[in-house]
Structure formats: structure tokens, C-alpha cells
Image (cartoon, helix red, strand yellow):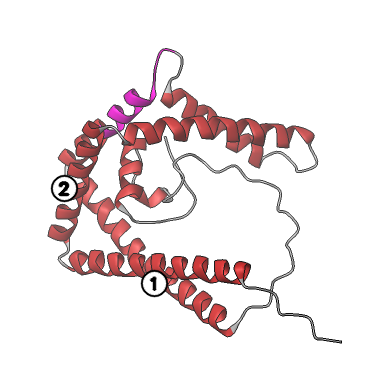
Amino acid sequence: MAARTTRRFTPTAWIVAAALGLSSATVLADDTTPAAPAAAPTAPAMPQLTPEQMKLMKDFQQTRQELDVIEQKLQALETKAFDKNPKLVKERDGLRDAIKSHMSDKNYDAQAEYDKLKALVTKIQGTPDSDPQKMKDIQTFRAGQQEFESRQQKAFEDPKIQKQSEKLRNDVRADMIKLDPSAKGLFDDLDKKEKHLHDLQTQAMQMQGSMQVAPAAPAPQQ
């Protein structure tokens, strides 16, 4: 099983990676199933940004870039940790099997469904936009993706799987720091910048909300 398109080195990212049998360097943080390509919509006109909004956007972009650098370093260390410690691989495989088992039932095989989704993405990517079958395949993919993610989310709500994934997270982190003590500082920087990114997102939502509820200026008296 594989996943995602945006790299995020978070506990969720590499735990999902472990569950799907891949290293976190190949996964994105939000999705755990392949993302189906869609035809690009016509871009709307960019709204006029206030100086405050521009400052917020630049801060967000810079923080995101800094996070990317940190995540790449941690992902490289994580790969080394798994390469050098067979026990971590066994632990990761056990978590993967537990999640797949929890997701599956007599009418649903998580691994088989994942393989179908992956094959469907390959088909979609090779189909020209002019082919009407492409949109049908995208719709089929989205339905399957929704089911897969719903079952996966329920699996991660299981206390046993949570405990198993937390142990793996701690064990991998300890091995990474053992391989390179600077990893501890990288984890600290990661936490700080992710918090800052979250704060920026909150500010942006509050700013948008205040703009929506702001009363319109009264019309001049005649």
C-alpha cells in the first residue's frame, strides 16, 4: 500500500507509511491513498490582498519551505534507522498487518482495494482529458478512496493500534537520535515550526471571517 502527495514528516505521516509498508519519505501527511489527477479548473481572478494578508502569506510560505528542509533531513535519518534495525522493520510490518486486518472484513480486503485504487490512478494518468471515461474513473476512484480512508480512520481509533503506533513512533525516533544526535534539535524545530504554521492558518481563518462579517460602508447621503 502507498500514499499521499505532500511530504510531511509527522508521527501520523510515518505511522501511516509504516502501516502501508512504505517509508514516510514516500507519503504525504493528509491522504493515505493515491491522489487521482483531475482536470485543472479555470483559475479565478486573484483578490486584492491587504498588506497584513501579504505579510501572513509570505510568513506561511517561508515557514513551509523551512519545514520542507527539516522534513527531508528527518526522512533520510528515518530511512537509515529502518535499514540498520531489523526489529523496527518487524515492528512496522506488525503495525501494517494490524491496520489492514482491522480495515478488512468478509466483504472488504484492504490490500486488494488499495491495489485497485493504485491501478486506477495509473489508468487515469494515462487517459487523455478528452476521453469521457476519465471522469468516470476519477469518480470511481474518489468513491473507493472515501471508503478506504473511512476504514483506515476507524482502524487508527482502535486503542491497540494507537498503542502499537505510538511505540513504533518512539522507537524510530530514539533510533534516529542515536544515529545522529542532531535529530533531537530537528524534532524540536519541527514542532515549533508546525505550531507556527498552525497559528498562521488560524490567523488567516480569523482574518477571512472578520472580512465576511464586516458591515458594508453606508451609502453617502444625497
Crowd band around label 1 with a 10 angstrom C-alpha radius: few (<14), some (14–19), many (20+): some
The total number of labels drawn is 2
Image quadrant where residue 179 sits: bottom left
Query: Who is closer to the viewer here, 154 or 131?
Result: 154
Left or right of 54, for residue 188: left
Residue for point 80% across, 41% down: 130
Identity of the amino acid at label 1?
A: Glu
User: Which region of the structure is painted magenta?
Assistant: 95-106
Residue for point 78% across, 37% down: 131
On the image, the x and y values in percent for residue 198 come to: 40, 64
- Residue at the disc numbered 2: 171
Left or right of 53, for residue 8: left
On the image, the x and y values in percent for residue 147 come to: 50, 30
Query: Who is closer to the viewer here, 103 or 111?
Result: 103
- Residue at the disc numbered 1: 66
On the image, the x and y values in percent for residue 24 come to: 35, 49
On the image, the x and y values in percent for residue 116 come to: 53, 27
Residue 78, relative to residue 71: is it above or below? above
Residue 166, relative to residue 97: is it above or below? below
Prevailing secondary structure class for the magenta stretch in the rendered image: helix
